[in-house]
């Protein structure tokens, strides 16, 4: 199938497919006599996997490695599990940081809400922070 057909079937743009091909996520497509890319039907499965992996927050380099393992005939499930565990750990840390940041901002906001802006100390940049 041509690039536009493959892109549409996968819910992506032709530009995205070219990008993935350029960055080693898609094998180089065969070319028709007139130079158009001709993707096999299996490309759609690969593109759908890439979309799911991106939705899980995996980096392109991580996805490329998973695909390399699969292309070499090895099941990458252990690597995917490990990447997802690491992703969950990172997300939990980010959430904890955001919760702490929110609490800090809420404290500052409480000060601002109770203060009179006309009473700001002229010697300070801002009395609220």
Image (cartoon, rainbow, N blue to C red):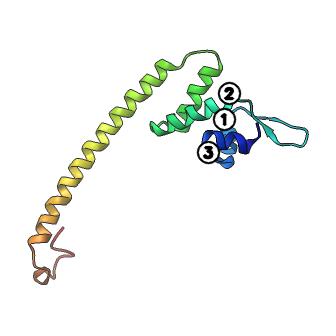
Q: Residue at x 45, y 36 (%)?
A: 56
Task: Describe residue 45's horizontal placement relative to residue 18 as left or right.
Answer: left
Residue drawn 39% across the image and 33% down it = 87
Helix, strand or loop at label 2? It is helix
Q: Nearer the viewer, residue 107 or 14?
A: 14
**Crowd around label 3: few <14 · some 14–19 · many ≥20 (10 Å):** some
Using a 10 Å C-alpha cutoff, classify the residue at mark 2 as few (fewer than 14 neighbours), some (14 to 19) or many (20 or more): few
Residue under numbered circle 1 = 24
Question: Viewed as shown, does residue 20 lie left or right of 38?
Answer: left
- The residue carrying mark 3 is 12
Distance, label 2 to label 1, CA atoms, is: 16 Å
Residue ranking furthest to the right? 33
Q: Are marks 3 and 2 in contact (CB under 8 Å)?
A: no
Nearest the eye: 2 or 126? 2
Q: In this rendering, is residue 88 above or below 12? A: above
Quadrant in which the C terminus appears: bottom left
Q: Position of residue 4 (x, y in %)?
A: 72, 45
């Amino acid at each position: 199938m041509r690039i536009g057909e493959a892109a549409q079937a996968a819910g992506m743009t032709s530009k995205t497919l070219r990008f993935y091909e350029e960055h080693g996520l898609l094998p180089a497509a065969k070319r028709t006599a007139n130079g158009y890319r001709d993707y096999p039907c299996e490309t759609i499965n690969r593109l759908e996997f890439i979309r799911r992996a991106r939705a899980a927050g995996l980096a392109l380099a991580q996805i490329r490695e998973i695909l390399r393992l699969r292309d070499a005939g090895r099941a990458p499930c252990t690597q995917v599990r490990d990447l997802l565990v690491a992703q969950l750990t990172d997300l939990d840390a980010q959430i904890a940081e955001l919760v702490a940041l929110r609490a800090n901002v809420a404290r500052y906001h409480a000060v601002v809400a109770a203060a009179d802006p006309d009473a700001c100390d002229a010697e300070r940049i801002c009395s609220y922070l």
